[in-house]
Each structure stands twice: as structure tokens, then as C-alpha cells.
Image: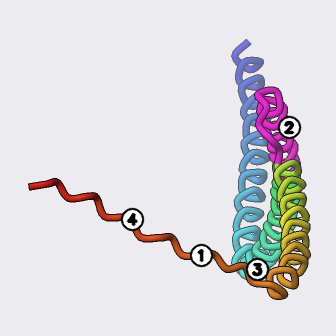
Amino acid sequence: MVKKLVAKKLKSVGIDSQLSATIRDSAEQIWLAGLGAFAKAQEEGTRVYDALIREGEAIQKKTRKVTEDKVTEMAAKATGTWDKLEQVFENRVARSLNSLGVPTKADVEQLAKRVTELKAEVEKLNRGAAKATKPASAAKPVRRAPKAAPKAAPRAAA
């Protein structure tokens, strides 16, 4: 029985030593792979770093362009909306003033034009009237007799 236990122990020790050897080999390979990766990263680090910078700049340019386009688009929409709002406000104010009887700008301009036309007509009529009255008065001047001096009041008797 002791022989069997010793054989079993030797067998299990052999399996354990194979397993530990395999683990040791794997750990060593992992360690070597890590060292290789580190060495490769040091060699190519600058090149990879520069490539990452170029990619970042390209993405930043695209992002800025898209952002600027969106801002321009939104500004155009806001301006259009503001113009519509302003027009609605002007129309409502005009309706309110009209309902109160306040003349519009067009009404005032039309009235000013009519006043100018009437002024021209009046001046034309005044010139015509002046021409018509001048010859008649120039032909025969009218003289008026001077007024007599008031008579002196009679003196009271002393």
C-alpha cells in the first residue's frame, strides 16, 4: 500500500511539475511579448503619435465645418422668423391705427402731393388775377378829393 501511495504521489508530482512548467513557459512568453510590444511602441511611438494628431486635426476640421454650417443655417432661420414676426407686428399696429382713424404714411404722402398741386393752382390763379387788374388801374387812376378840414366851433360869447 505504501508503494501505491508513493507511486501516486510521484505521479501527481510529475503532473504538477508539468503543469508548473507549462505555466512558467506561458508566463515567460507573456513577459517577452510585453517587452516586445514595449520596444515596438518606443520605435513607432512618434510615428503613431503624429498619425493620431493628423487624424484629430481632420476630425476637428470636419466638426468645425459642420458646426459653422449649422450655425449659419440656424441664423438664417432665426432672421427669417424675426422678419416674419416684425411684419406681423407692423400689420397689427397699422390695423390698430387705422381703426382709430390715424392716417397711414401713404395717406399723408397723397395729401402732401394734393397740397402741392393745389398750391400750384392757387399761384397760377393769383398770377392771372394780378395781370387782369393791372391794366384797368393803370389806364385811369382814381383820385379822391381831400377831406375838408373840420369847421371851427363857434366861440362862446363873452
Q: Quadrant of residue 131?
A: bottom right
Mark earlier in primary sequence (3, 2) = 3
- Measured Cα–Cα span from mark 1 to mark 3: 122 Å
Q: Quadrant of residue 44?
A: bottom right
- Measured Cα–Cα span from mark 4 to mark 1: 15 Å
In the rendered structure, the answer to whether residue 124 lies left or right of residue 146 reads right
- Measured Cα–Cα span from mark 1 to mark 2: 72 Å
Q: Is residue 88 within the magenta segment?
A: yes
Of residue 132 and residue 21, the one placed in the foreground of this image is 132
Q: Which residue position holds label 4?
A: 150
Give the label on residue 91, or none. 2
Could you tell me which secondary element the residue under label 4 belongs to?
Answer: loop
Q: Amino acid at mark 4?
A: Pro
Residue neighbourhood size for the residue with mark 4, other residues' Cα within 10 Å, grouped as few (<14), some (14–19), many (≥20): few
Q: Main secondary structure of the magenta part?
A: helix
Q: Nearer the viewer, mark 3 or mark 4?
A: 4
Mark earlier in primary sequence (4, 2) = 2
Q: Is residue 136 above or below residue 151?
A: below
In the rendered structure, the answer to whether residue 3 lies left or right of residue 76 reads left
Q: Nearer the viewer, mark 1 or mark 3?
A: 1
Could you tell me which secondary element the residue under label 3 belongs to?
Answer: helix
Q: Which residue position holds label 1?
A: 145
Give the label on residue 128, or none. none
- Measured Cα–Cα span from mark 3 to mark 2: 61 Å
What residue appears at the point 88 percent right and 61 percent down from the top-left corner?
A: 118
Q: Which residue position holds label 3?
A: 50
- Measured Cα–Cα span from mark 4 to mark 2: 77 Å
Q: Are marks 1 and 3 in contact (CB under 8 Å)?
A: no
Find the magenta span and give its range: 79-104
In the rendered structure, the answer to whether residue 65 lies left or right of residue 150 reads right
